[in-house]
Image (cartoon, grey):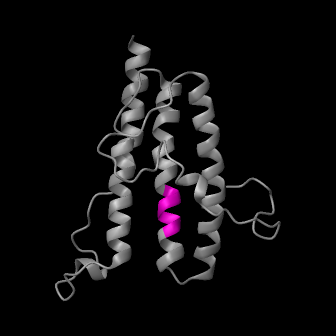
Amino acid sequence: MLKTLSALVGASLLLASCQQAPQENSATPSNTTENTEKSEAVVAYEEANARMHAGMGNIHPDPDIAFMQGMIPHHEGAVEMAEIVLKHGKDPEVQALARTVIAAQTEEIAQMRAWLKERDALLDKPADDESGAEGSDDLKAISVPNITEAEDPDHSGH
């Protein structure tokens, strides 16, 4: 029992550390007094972050299952963030990394979902989740680019 409780506390701390505290003195355009309007990209990132954290809120008592269930929305959040930067970003290096993230994280999501399905532990998407990310075909519809050796020389996919 103590071992399970320790694992749950550890998993909770790990998941809580993923959330970034707002910075009052940030010089980003959305936090200045001159520009109170948030850019489309900032709004998209905030929405993706909220969906990701909502999906990570149900922690299973089994640490292995808790890890897999928590990592799926975490990875889906990474994929969504990568899609946002592909739409709004301009730096070619960031764009290439975003494509790599999409390919790697999508593959890992499928692996985790299969592992959970084998154990009858695959969660349905939460009722208040309007993203449709988990339990739908949204991730299957993502166009995953071919990663060349130049982009992924060690073939690790990470």
Q: Residue furthest left?
A: 33
Give 145 or 70, whichever is nearer the viewer: 145
Name the image quarter holding the N terminus.
top left
Magenta stretch? 78-83
Give 71 or 2, whichever is nearer the viewer: 71
Question: Where does residue 63 sit, x and y in percent of width and height?
Answer: 48, 25
The answer to whether residue 158 is above or below residue 150 is above
Q: Quadrant of residue 151?
A: bottom right
Question: Where does residue 89 sit, x and y in percent of width and height?
Answer: 50, 80
- Residue located 60% across and 52% down the image: 140
- Left or right position of 38 against 124: left
The answer to whether residue 146 is above or below residue 130 is below
Name the image quarter holding the C terminus.
bottom right
Q: Residue furthest top?
A: 1
**Residue 95 among those drawn in magenta:** no
Chief secondary structure of the magenta portion: helix
Q: In which quarter of the image is residue 99?
A: bottom right
In this rendering, the count of numbered labels is 0
- Residue located 38% across and 66% down the image: 45
Q: Residue furthest bottom?
A: 34
- Left or right position of 91 against 28: right
Question: Where does residue 55 sit, x and y in percent of width and height?
Answer: 38, 43
The answer to whether residue 135 is above or below residue 4 is below
Q: Can residue 19 be seen in this view?
A: no
Question: Where does residue 154 sit, x and y in percent of width and height?
Answer: 80, 58
**Residue 79 among those drawn in magenta:** yes
The answer to whether residue 23 is above or below residue 78 is below
- Left or right position of 31 against 91: left
- Residue located 19% across and 89% down the image: 34
Q: Is residue 61 visible?
A: yes
- Residue located 60% across and 75% down the image: 95
